[in-house]
Amino acid sequence: MGVGGRPPAPVKGGGMSRVMTRALESSAMAYPVNRRIAERAGLSIRERVHIVVYFLVLFLGALFYIWVQSAVVEASYRLSALREEARALTASQDDLKVEIARLRSPAELSRVAMEELHMVQPEPGQVVFVE
């Protein structure tokens, strides 16, 4: 507070009070970052908003890029897993086709009929041809 309980009067041209200017100068000596801020105190609010918006857009762009790249990596892992599954299913399909061909062969049909169903070859007189 200034003299008489009133706030300090602003300094002409700077827009900051003498107390604020002294506080910035003393803290600028202690902290180099504050010195840069004090030196940039001449920026208008509009310029500061533009800088903040610029960095915000830059940050959001980088965040979006990272998100897209992680989605691409995840999709490539899924694609790799699906390709492996397709390869395994194709191999299984080939095995099943071989099994079907084996089961349809006349030798296998004869074996199943005799061993599992206990059928026998017909005698020559048991076969009747119909014309």
Image (cartoon, grey):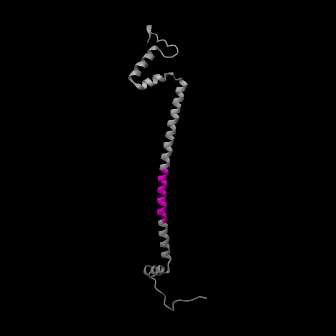
Along the viewing direction, whichever of 123 and 44 lies nearer the viewer: 44
Residue positioned 51% across, 45% down in the render: 68
Please name the residue shown 50% across and 71% down the image.
97
Query: Quick one: which residue is furthest to the right in this view?
Result: 131
In the displayed structure, 125 sits above or below 4; it is below
Q: Position of residue 127 (x, y in %)?
A: 53, 89
Q: Residue at x 52, y 29 (%)?
A: 51
- For residue 81: magenta? yes
- 99, above or below 40, in the image: below
Looking at the rendered structure, the number of numbered marks drawn on it comes to 0
Where is residue 130, by image quadrant?
bottom right
Q: Give the range drawn in magenta.
A: 74-90
Q: Where is residue 53 in the image (x, y as percent from the top left)?
A: 53, 31
- The answer to whether residue 26 is above or below residue 97 is above
User: Where is residue 98 drawn, in percent x and y?
Assistant: 48, 72
Considering the image in quadrants, where does the C terminus appear? bottom right
